[in-house]
Amino acid sequence: MLESLGLDPVEERVYRFLVTTAEAEVTDLIGNLGIDAETAETVLISMRVRGLIRTVSPGRRRFTAVAPDIVLGSQLLRHQQALDWARREVNQLSEEYRDNSRRRDAGRLVEVLPNRVVLREHLDHLQETARHEVLYLCRGRAIVMPAEENHAELFALRRGVEYRVIYEKALLEEEGMQANVAYGVKLGEQARAMPWLPVRLTVVDREVAVLPLVQEAGISEPTAALVRGGQLLEALIALFEGYWERATPLRIAEDGALTEGTTPCPLGSDDLYLVSLLVAGVPDKSIATQLGISQRTVQRRVSNIMERAGAQTRMQLAWRAATEHWL
């Protein structure tokens, strides 16, 4: 059992014997383990050199085992580190192999997933191996995996993978769906809603996408395209980002319910007017003249507005005002 840590069967028997007896002499090994004197001497010398055992006191021929968590634990850690390194190398080599294969054969850019079982296995695997980001377009009436069964997302969120999900309104109207989405949002999912979505789509780490080829629910065997790299994948990502910009954010209300809409605007009408001038590109000097105040006052008001809006720069202020529909 300990061969993976460098102990052969005889050494393991000797080590286990010393662990259970605290200390022993060569004659104890011969009598209890049934090994000859020469083998016992050879094994003890080898194990002592490797730090597995030690003599009880200088000049004595009694031996005791070094604590397993010290001598074997460190070896186990080194083995684990070596396995982790090897796993990363295999993943890198596999990715290089796929990239080179796709360059040689454009047909490898798209793979057809032929049925529900294979499609679900790929969706689970892609989320389990996601490193940075998962993008979803979720339509109503799931054809492969209902949202409440997507346990891989919950584990991915907990380990820090970012999820951005756009839900079709019809899906949010299904029984129990709003509570399910609210739970995901609490774990960190960024959720938005659209009245209608053209396709179902999953994109993982901007490296691979899954696109069902048949949209209707209830079909016997749904199929999907697995897209790796290339302009088709870039087009699918652009499709998602376009809908993301137009979608309405979904948030958690104080009572824990899922609500649709933007963050309440923290700015008054005068401040919003000033922001609208900034967004329009009007210089501070012209704004000061138009409002009848000094340029320094304009700058001070802009700084106050940025602080209340949670923006670090004027560009962030303009972006938030646009995305939150304050103007």
Image (spheres, rainbow, N blue to C red):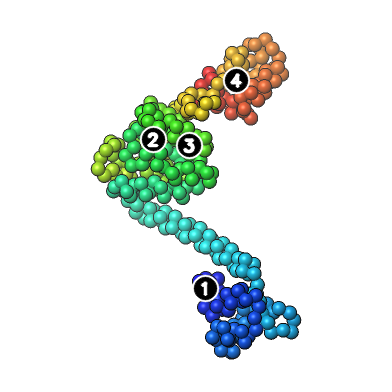
Query: Does 83 appear above or below 287?
Result: below
Using a 10 Å C-alpha cutoff, classify the residue at mark 4 as few (fewer than 14 neighbours), some (14 to 19) or many (20 or more). Answer: few
290 lies above or below 79 = above
* Residue 207 x %, y %: 44, 46
Please give the residue where the numbered disc 2 appears in the rendered image: 138
Q: Earlier in the sequence, mark 3 or mark 4?
A: 3
Whether 200 is drawn above or below 311: the answer is below
Within 10 Å of disc 1 (Cα), the crowding (few <14, some 14-19, many 20+) is: few
Asked if marks 4 and 2 touch (Cβ < 8 Å), the reply is no
Q: Nearer the viewer, residue 202 or 10?
A: 10
Please report contact status of discs 1 and 2: CB closer than 8 Å, yes or no.
no
Question: Disc 4 marks which residue?
Answer: 266
When asked about the image quadrant of residue 150, the answer is top left
- Residue 97 makes an appearance in the image: yes
Q: Element under label 3?
A: helix
Q: CA distance from mark 1 to mark 3?
A: 45 Å
Hey, what amino acid is under mark 2? Cys
From the viewer's perspective, is 323 left or right of 142? right
Residue at the spot x=62%, y=66% of the render? Answer: 69
> Rounded to the nearest whole Å, what is the CA distance between mark 4 and mark 1?
66 Å
C-alpha distance separating marks 3 and 4: 26 Å
Cα separation, mark 4 vs mark 2, equals 32 Å
